[in-house]
Image: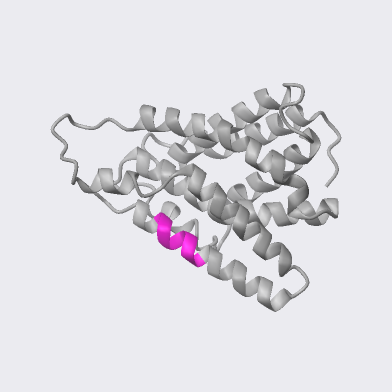
């Protein structure tokens, strides 16, 4: 996939596609909640792609970002979506699930499953190993950490009497974007090593899909 526009402009097109997909969803819809978070991340990517020297290879980052977004957008319209996305799609209107849970479940599905597959797809198209993208992959972490802090602050309003043993606090403490991206990078490297063994690659990708879905379902445990 060749980029015919500037990297920031290419990612802005991705942001527009995401906006079209989630715009107009009713308030509280879990897909819409995650979509709003995704747009925050994508807007931050656009800004940082215009900063000279922030990324080692802005065109490669934009390429990865587009392939990454395609997996989320594809899941929304698929007749049989990947297992990792089914919990969010099935429970998106459950009244007992808080917005922060929808946001974290979507981030989990997208990062722990879609991201490693997108890294491998990008590396195949560039004919390079994942290590060639490693610096920029980890450069995104600081950007995402700030967005995660904003998301938690915006979506999480806790009653003052909440006990430290409350299930919501336990759930929120069980997932972090940094740990998810570390796991995604490890998965990408593992899948890359299996790229010439189609059966093994397919089995590993299917297992990753299922286990990611299990975590997302746990994050979407109704708590009220």
How far from the left and from the top, in percent, is residue 179?
Answer: 49, 48
Left or right: 223 in relation to 92: left
> What coloring was used for the rendering?
one colour
How far from the left and from the top, in percent, is residue 212?
Answer: 48, 60
Is residue 142 on the magenta stretch? Answer: no
How far from the left and from the top, in percent, is residue 61?
Answer: 73, 39
Write down the quadrant of residue 48 in the picture.
Answer: top right
Residue at horizontal 36 percent and vertical 39 percent from the top = 100
Left or right: 54 in relation to 102: right
Vertical order, 154 against 169 (above or below): above
Is residue 214 on the magenta stretch? Answer: yes
Pick the front one: 156 or 52: 52
| Visible residue check, residue 75 | no
Write down the quadrant of residue 150 in the picture.
Answer: top left
Write down the quadrant of residue 20 in the picture.
Answer: top right
Vertical order, 149 against 75 (above or below): above
| Visible residue check, residue 102 | yes
Residue at horizontal 36 percent and vertical 49 percent from the top = 174
Q: Which residues are magenta?
A: 210-216
How far from the left and from the top, in percent, is residue 115?
Answer: 62, 51
Residue at horizontal 72 percent and vertical 66 percent from the top = 193
């Amino acid at each position: 996939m060749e980029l015919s526009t500037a990297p920031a402009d290419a990612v802005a097109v991705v942001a527009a596609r995401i906006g079209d997909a989630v715009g107009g969803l009713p308030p509280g819809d879990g897909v819409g909640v995650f979509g709003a978070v995704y747009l925050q991340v994508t807007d931050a990517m656009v800004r940082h792609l215009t900063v000279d020297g922030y990324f080692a290879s802005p065109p490669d980052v934009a390429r990865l970002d587009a392939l990454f977004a395609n997996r989320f957008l594809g899941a929304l319209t698929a007749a049989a979506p990947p297992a990792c996305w089914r919990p969010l799609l099935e429970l998106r209107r459950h009244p007992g699930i808080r917005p922060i849970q929808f946001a974290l479940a979507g981030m989990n599905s997208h990062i722990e499953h879609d991201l490693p597959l997108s890294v491998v797809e990008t590396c195949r198209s560039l004919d390079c190993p994942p290590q060639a993208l490693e610096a920029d992959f980890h450069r995104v972490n600081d950007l995402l950490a700030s967005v995660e802090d904003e998301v938690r602050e915006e979506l999480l309003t806790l009653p003052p009497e909440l006990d430290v043993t409350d299930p919501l606090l336990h759930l929120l403490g069980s997932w972090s974007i940094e740990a998810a991206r570390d796991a995604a990078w490890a998965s990408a490297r593992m899948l890359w090593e299996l790229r010439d063994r189609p059966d093994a690659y397919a089995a590993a990708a299917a297992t990753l899909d299922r286990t990611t879905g299990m975590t997302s379902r746990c994050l979407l445990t109704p708590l009220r």
